[in-house]
Image (spheres, rainbow, N blue to C red):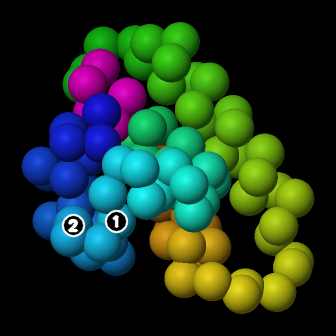
Amino acid sequence: MLCRFFSGCHLFVPIFDVSYDSYDGLKERSPWTFDAILAVAGKIKSGNNPPAPSFYKALEEAQGIARSSLFGPVARKEAVQGKFSVNSIGEMYSGPL
């Protein structure tokens, strides 16, 4: 799923460094950003078909973390990446890709 995200969405949402933001690195540093990427990739995978349950699960996790940190201070770049990614999911979810 991470490869799917970086093969297409990364061009339109260029907030990640492919050489630094690896699968293991994102998973360890920022579960929020990781969940957001999985949700975006899940939406891409489904195309115009209804999203799979994995999309909804990743979206639920990412939005839950987003809600809990909405008004907190931003201490790391991964928090900004997560907020931006969750926002892009909202844009994608409201209409076709």
Q: Is residue 40 left or right of residue 60?
A: left
Q: CA distance from mark 2 to mark 1?
A: 5 Å
Question: Residue 91's mark?
Answer: none
* x 42%, y 18%: residue: 51
The answer to whether residue 88 of the structure is visible from this angle is no
Q: Is residue 40 left or right of residue 72?
A: left
Q: Nearer the viewer, residue 28 or 67?
A: 28
User: What's the amino acid at mark 2?
Assistant: Val
Location of residue 95 in the rendering, given as x and y in whole percent from the top left corner? 39, 40
Tell whether label 1 touches label 2 (CB within 8 Å): yes
Location of residue 31 in the rendering, given as x and y in whole percent from the top left corner? 61, 50
In the image, is residue 68 part of the stretch drawn in magenta? no
How many callouts does the rendering have? Answer: 2
Question: Residue 18's mark?
Answer: 2
In the rendered image, the vertical position of residue 61 relative to residue 79, given as above or below: above
Disc 1 marks which residue?
21
* x 82%, y 57%: residue: 67
- The 10 Å Cα crowd at callout 1, few under 14, some 14 to 19, many 20 or more, is some
* x 73%, y 85%: residue: 74
In the rendered image, the vertical position of residue 39 relative to residue 13, given as above or below: above
Q: Nearer the viewer, residue 5 or 90?
A: 5
Main secondary structure of the magenta stretch: helix
In the rendered image, the vertical position of residue 82 relative to residue 50, given as above or below: below
In the image, is residue 42 part of the stretch drawn in magenta? yes
> Range of the magenta residues?
41-46
Q: Which quadrant of the view contains residue 25?
A: bottom left
Quadrant of image for the N terminus: top left
Q: Check disc 2 and report its element: helix, strand or loop.
A: loop
Q: Is residue 90 left or right of residue 65?
A: left
